[in-house]
Image (cartoon, grey):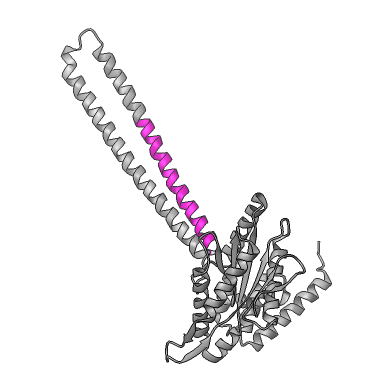
Amino acid sequence: MFVTADTDQFNRSHETAGAAMALMQRKLIAVSPKSFWVWFEYCRGSNLELVRTIDVLISNNREFTDDLNEELYDQFFTASRETKAVRETGQRVQETLNEVLTWLGEAESGAKTYGETLESLSGELASKQPEANLGLLIRRVMSETREMAERSAALENRLQSSSSRIVELTKNLEEVRREAMTDVLTGIANRKYFNERLQECLRDAMENGEELCLLIADIDHFKRFNDTWGHPFGDQVLKVVARALTEGVKGRDTAARYGGEEFAIILPRTSLKDAITVAEHIRHDIAKRNLVKRSTGEPVGKVTLSLGVARFEPGEPVGEFLRRADEALYAAKHGGRNRVVAQAEPGTHTSVTA
């Protein structure tokens, strides 16, 4: 039986493949199965997070080297390091538990044998004339007891070793999870952790009726830093901003790298007024810093941020909440940059600074 492929789907796939190859040729990207899949999916446009990431890289004039394409493939099309670590750790813990169960089975068998031996010796001692064999019986009791004690000590050592191994595996897994949730460049939370934490805060806000605000910040004219001073300096700017955001929030707040030169801060149990105050504090803190290129000591000038703030409306979808914060940021960028714009509720904008 032959199955005929859908003609429209066939044509779309070929068009997408052609567009991907053309784009890779324009950007001098070496063709490999992994790099082609990255750009095929980009041209297809169904993976919105991939599209957003590549668009940011393109806007920053990043060169799509083999390493960068490999990183994109690993990020979006393979199991994450965290997932692999969880699977491997689970297997190793299971192996350890199987060993423990085997040891416990052996110990149970040994204890049963010891009990049966003691019961037999007890019966002999209770006989009418144990005197002749008393010394021998005592030596047998002592021998069996010593062997049981040795088996118990060996089991205890094995169990302690297994416990230590499981604790170490757990620590390693926690470390991998922390790394998976951390932006490699800036050292603050990454988009993955941001998404998880935002969902938690949304649930808490709806359950407890508490206020929740979201702040999204974008570095003004970041492309100019990269074009003028190079990408290594642009990376340093990202680190400076990340540090300022971390220093500007409280323990329950979460600062994260949202993507490219964008950052976000989740502000649970925070009113819109207080969220605006946080945004203004961060904006002023960044604006007063004078940057210098380390390699030459040459002054570079100042970095400014545009910030959008939105207050969560109970029951609204998370996508709508994010969209409103993005919309407020967009208004700040188009209102002159280096300012805070807040959106108290859908359809409203308040320019806070100028």
- Total residue callouts: 0
Question: Quick one: which residue is furthest to the top in this view?
Answer: 128
Left or right, 150 with reference to 57: left
Left or right, 17 with reference to 29: right
Q: Name the spot of residue 128 as percent of width and height, x first.
A: 23, 7
Q: Name the spot of residue 65 as percent of width and height, x first.
A: 56, 83
Left or right, 157 with reference to 207: left
Left or right, 194 with reference to 293: right
Quarter of the image where the C terminus is located: bottom right
Query: Magenta stretch?
Result: 81-110
Residue, x 74% and y 78% (percent of image)?
16
Residue, x 25% and y 10% (percent of image)?
127
Q: Is residue 67 visible?
A: no
Q: Is residue 208 visible?
A: yes
Residue, x 81% and y 64% (percent of image)?
3
Of residue 300 and residue 51, the one placed in the foreground of this image is 300
Toward which corner of the image does residue 56 lie, by quadrant? Answer: bottom right
In the figure, 326 relative to 118: above or below? below
Asked whether residue 162 is drawn in magenta, I would say no
Quarter of the image where the N terminus is located: bottom right
Toward which corner of the image does residue 171 lie, by quadrant? Answer: bottom left
Q: Name the spot of residue 88 as percent of width and height, x first.
A: 49, 56
Asked whether residue 100 is drawn in magenta, I would say yes
Of residue 128 and residue 74, the one placed in the foreground of this image is 74
